[in-house]
């Protein structure tokens, strides 16, 4: 089973702490973290880097379940409030340096309350193409 937590605990209350909800090592094969940069798409949101979105929950997972495989179960970046192409490029750097335990990333490819699509602009299309074509992301290939 892949057990998934949100990067941001909503509501941010003690009873909603993922540590209290963990079903146990026998039930969990992998842990995922879902996190988004909403930019200014919502009235209460602000632009955040990939690292800002994932740092606290990633560190919490490593403190409590360091031996479990880990992925970014869902992520995406809005198109308003900052530079999405730069966000994708900085995600690349963060995955290689800060978030080395992530074994995979699932991109949320939809247009809903924000335009989450990687190729929502020519610049973000190019940044995402450069990201996923690197050998670093092709496990098992030289």
Image: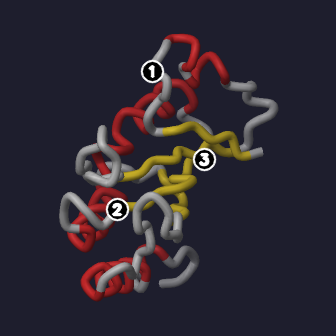
Across and down, in percent, residue 91 comes to 31, 62
Earlier sequence position, callout 2 versus callout 3: 3
Crowdedness near tag 2: few (<14), some (14–19) or many (≥20) residues, C-alpha within 10 Å: many
Label 3, on which residue?
69
The residue lying at 38 percent from left, 85 percent from top is 129
Quarter of the rendering containing residue 132:
bottom left
Label 2, on which residue?
78
- Check if mark 2's residue and mark 3's residue have beta carbons within 8 Å: no
Distance of label 2 from label 3 (alpha carbons): 27 Å
Earlier sequence position, callout 1 versus callout 2: 1
The residue lying at 52 percent from left, 64 percent from top is 108
Chosen colour scheme: secondary structure
Against 8, residue 21 (above or below) is above
Residue 45 is left or right of residue 20, and the answer is: left
- Name the secondary structure under disc 3: loop
Across and down, in percent, residue 27 comes to 80, 33
The residue lying at 26 percent from left, 49 percent from top is 48
Across and down, in percent, residue 4 comes to 63, 41
Label 1, on which residue?
12
The residue lying at 54 percent from left, 20 percent from top is 17
Earlier sequence position, callout 1 versus callout 3: 1
Residue 88 is left or right of residue 108, and the answer is: left
Distance of label 1 from label 3 (alpha carbons): 25 Å
Against 120, residue 58 (above or below) is above
Q: Quadrant of the N terminus?
A: top right
In this view, the residue in front, 133 or 74, is 74
Q: Nearer the viewer, mark 1 or mark 3?
A: 1
Distance of label 1 from label 2 (alpha carbons): 23 Å
Across and down, in percent, residue 130 comes to 33, 84
The circle on residue 114 is none
Q: Nearer the viewer, mark 2 or mark 3?
A: 2
């Amino acid at each position: 089973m892949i057990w998934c937590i949100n990067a941001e605990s909503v509501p941010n209350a003690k009873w909603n702490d993922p540590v209290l909800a963990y079903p146990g090592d026998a039930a969990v094969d992998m842990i995922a973290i879902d996190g988004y940069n909403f930019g200014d798409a919502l009235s209460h949101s602000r632009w955040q880097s990939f690292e800002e979105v994932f740092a606290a929950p990633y560190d919490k997972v490593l403190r409590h379940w360091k031996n479990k495989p880990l992925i970014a179960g869902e992520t995406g970046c809005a198109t308003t409030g900052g530079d999405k192409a730069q966000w994708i490029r900085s995600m690349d750097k963060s995955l290689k340096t800060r978030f080395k335990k992530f074994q995979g990333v699932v991109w949320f490819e939809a247009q809903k309350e924000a335009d989450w699509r990687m190729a929502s602009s020519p610049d973000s299309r190019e940044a995402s193409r450069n990201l996923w074509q690197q050998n670093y992301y092709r496990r098992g290939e030289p």
